[in-house]
Structures are given as structure tokens and as C-alpha cells.
Image (cartoon, grey):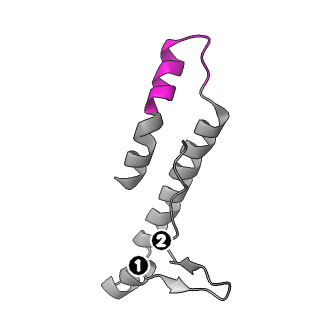
Amino acid sequence: DQASGLLAPTDWHVIKATEVADYNVPENITTFRADVRAKSNEMETQIDACNSVDELKSLYEYTEQDDGSITRPLGEFPKEVV
């Protein structure tokens, strides 16, 4: 659902490209959409590999890294294209 929500604002580019012969989806949009799908697939694989609620919970737990960044094992979706 989250991936779908991230893709929805750029769907019109894809629709227009199928309806208007001389229109191409901008490269930054196609890259973003591919990145969202790839991350969604990666997240689903991680979630599917869990054998317990505790394993699933651990994917969502944020921790501070040595460099000061805050991350979680599941990762994050790409930032939306403006």
C-alpha cells in the first residue's frame, strides 16, 4: 500500500505516455518508480523471511549507527520526486 501511494502521484506521466505519442516519461520519474518497486520487493522479501513476531518487530526498530544516522533493518522508501 505504501509503495502504491508513492507511485500514485506520478501515474499520470505513465498514462500520458500511453495516450500521447510524442510524450515520454521523464527519466527521473522512471528511475524513482523503479526504485520504489525494487525497495518494495526487498522489504517484502525481508518480511516474508520472518519466522516470528519478534523477528518482524526487529525489522522496524530504529537504531543509531556509528556515523550518527538513525536506520532500521527494513530500510526506507526513496524520497518522493518533486
Q: Left or right: where does residue 46 sit relative to residue 67?
A: left
The residue depicted at 41 percent of the width and 77 percent of the height is 60
**Where on the picture, by quarter, is residue 31?**
top right
Task: Read off the residue under disc 1.
Answer: 50
Q: Left or right: where does residue 33 sit relative to residue 11?
A: right
CA distance separating discs 2 and 1: 7 Å
Task: Read off the residue under disc 2.
Answer: 46
Position of 30 relative to 22 (above/below): below
Q: Give the residue type at disc 1.
A: Cys
Q: Position of residue 19 (x, y in %)?
A: 48, 13
Q: Position of residue 9 (x, y in %)?
A: 43, 38
Q: How many circles with numbers are drawn on the protein?
A: 2
Position of 45 relative to 81 (above/below): below
SS at badge 1: loop
Q: Farthest top residue?
A: 21
Magenta range is 11-24
Labels 2 and 1 touching (C-beta < 8 A)? yes
Q: Left or right: where does residue 47 sit relative to residue 64?
A: left
